[in-house]
Image (tube, rainbow, N blue to C red):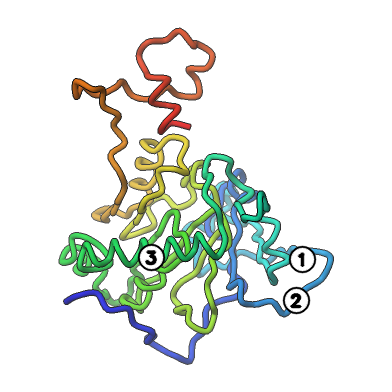
Amino acid sequence: MAYEPSQNMANPGLRPRLDQAAFNLTPSQAATTAYVPSMADTSVATDEQEHHNYPTDTSNTHDNTADDSRSRSSKYTYRSEIDAGRFIKRIGGRAYNTLSETYFLPSDDDEWSRLNKQHVALVLSLGDLYPAVEEVRALLAPVPGQTKRILDLGCGTGVWAMDMAREFPEAEVIGVDLAPVPADLDTMPPNCRFEIDDINLGLDHFRDSFDVVHMRLVGSGLKNFRKTMDDGHQCLKPGGIALWMDVDYDMYAEDQHVYLPFALEEDEDNPDQTDRSWFQRIVYGK
């Protein structure tokens, strides 16, 4: 069946959660991850930005033991565009994220429009929201007593995550991005939520938690795309599927041979090393 975006939800009486508790954050992640409602909620506009600490929502935590590296973290919820502004900086009339210097593209209306057009182009080229259609649908088919879970890394405007939430209303969908997602609570599926985080910092708090992990055209924001690919795979449950759509990260010389792997951060202490390519790092390794 060809992809057709749907606005229908499994239960139109449900609404997305505004206050979303921390999800298995490690101490290092707790300071950088935010759980966010819609930017459309602008009812609170105060000079002082609000911070809220809530108990961990155990319904969304897979390991509620005494191990603080896996649970009992605080969370941050923004209540207005003013509050969300702490994640945005303005340069030359454009808005950019404040969490990562690696990702250099804007986060504003013009960029959101481009990302949504890109989404439509990719869906039309695939003929659906995702490749391996039969395998993905079989994996996400409802199973009594289980909640299937989908993770969208570098979710952009959140359009793919929300479309997946509508197609699989019994699954839980989480989108992660560097900047607030321009989602509207009135059209956002209740089984979808978004987080603000820099996936370059690692994904240990998501380990072994998802049936499908999706990453699409995120390479320009990654410090080490091979490491992030490995991190994404570690987020999968046994038998899960990773969907990665991106460009070819191998750089080729004129005679078609492949350059060495890009130099790593630790190579800065040994600039004369010859096992990895500094030129490759400039282009792809950041």
**Nearer-the-camera pick, 262 or 24:** 262
Question: Where's residue 136, x and y in %?
Answer: 22, 64
Tell me where residue 47 sits by quadrant.
Answer: bottom right
**Nearer-the-camera pick, 98 or 233:** 98
Distance CA(mark 3)–CA(mark 1): 34 Å
Give the farthest residue toward the front.
92
| Three-letter residue code for mark 3 | Lys
Question: Where's residue 76, x and y in %?
Answer: 66, 61
Quadrant of the rendering where the N terminus is positioned: bottom left
| Three-letter residue code for mark 2 | Val
Q: Where is mark 1, residue-wise?
A: 50
Task: Note whether 207 is above or below 272 in the view shown.
Answer: below
Of discs 1 and 2, which sits in the foreground?
2
Q: Residue at x 19, y 24 (%)?
A: 256
Q: Residue at x 47, y 36 (%)?
A: 223
Relative to 188, 89 lies left or right: right
Tell me where residue 94 sits by quadrant.
Answer: bottom right
* Whether label 3 touches label 2, CB < 8 Å: no
* Whether label 1 touches label 2, CB < 8 Å: yes
Question: Where's residue 15, x and y in %?
Answer: 52, 84
Q: Where is mark 2, residue-wise?
A: 44
Q: Residues within 10 Å of mark 1 (few under 14, many from 20)?
A: some
Task: Note whether 166 is above or below 68 in the view shown.
Answer: below
Q: Where is mark 3, residue-wise?
A: 117
* Whether label 3 touches label 1, CB < 8 Å: no
- Counting the numbered discs, the total is 3
Q: Answer with mark 1 or mark 2, whichever residue precedes in sequence.
A: 2
Question: Where's residue 266, x and y in %?
Answer: 50, 20
Q: Residue at x 31, y 77 (%)?
A: 167
The kind of secondary structure element at disc 3 is helix
The kind of secondary structure element at disc 1 is loop
